[in-house]
Image (cartoon, rainbow, N blue to C red):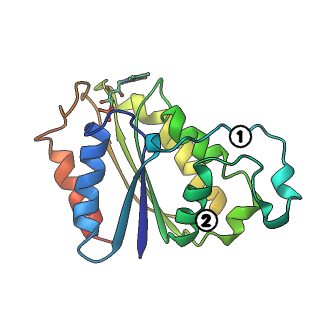
Amino acid sequence: MNILILTGSPRKGSNTDMLANAFADGARLKHNVEIVSVNDYKINACIGCNSCFTREGNKCFQKDGMEQIYAKMADADMLVIASPVYFYGVSAQLKNIIDRCHTPMRKNFKIKKTALLLVAGSSKPCVFDAIVRQYELIVDYFHFEDKGRILVGGVNDKCSIDGREELKQAYSLGESL
Ligand SMILES: Cc1cc2nc3c(=O)[nH]c(=O)nc-3n(C[C@H](O)[C@H](O)[C@H](O)COP(=O)(O)O)c2cc1C
């Protein structure tokens, strides 16, 4: 499979990145894995004009980093969303990408499988609830196959995920694919 991992933390080498790397190390044993740090791309928010529905090739009128992300998504068999929890949601950078998938262009995507990797400062399990529910609804809507979720609470400072058991779980999840 071609596995595309979108990492949503603007903090380089962050907890999100470390979790995504652990997953990728396991997955690379059998698959092609690309990690894309979405903060490296300038991606505007969807403005809801719906002009992509009638435009040739269903292309968005906005010429920004999303053109590259669309191309990566078109090549991917599996999509992994890796994000810090920001006010109970994914980071704004990732949300922009999700919203920009409100386009008929996505009919060209062949993504069948997904996974979710999250980190949060709080240790309360409920801190992930809103994102997990949104993820479940999206998986259901698109008939994706959910391959798993790794949710890591209680990590706030950069790299405080180091040594956590969930890094091994993320590796195993990647390896299991
Ligand atoms: C804008 C912002 C909003 C945040 N909101 C939450 C939150 O709602 N709940 C929580 O537990 N942690 C919250 N955090 C803490 C981050 O989830 C936590 O520091 C995480 O480890 C950051 O991931 P990173 O190291 O990959 O950047 C927030 C951090 C920021 C910067």
144 to 84, vertically: above or below? below
In the rendered image, residue 66, in percent from the top left (x then y), is placed at 60, 51
The residue under the point 39% across, 37% down is 9
79 to 41, vertically: above or below? below
Q: Using residue 97 as the reference point, say whether residue 160 is left or right of it.
A: left
**Among the 4 quarters of the image, the one containing residue 124:** top left
In the rendered image, residue 169, in percent from the top left (x then y), is placed at 22, 54
Where ligand 1 lies, by image quadrant? Answer: top left
Q: In what quadrant of the picture does the C terminus appear?
A: bottom left
Q: Is residue 170 visible?
A: no
Q: Using residue 55 as the reference point, say whether residue 158 is left or right of it.
A: left
Q: Residue reaching furthest left?
A: 163
Q: Is residue 75 visible?
A: yes
The residue under the point 84% across, 65% down is 56
The residue indicated by pointer 1 is 46
In the rendered image, residue 150, in percent from the top left (x then y), is placed at 32, 48
The amino acid marked with disc number 1 is Cys
Secondary structure at badge 2 equals loop
The residue indicated by pointer 2 is 143
Pointer 1 with pointer 2, Cβ within 8 A: no
The amino acid marked with disc number 2 is His
The residue under the point 62% across, 56% down is 67
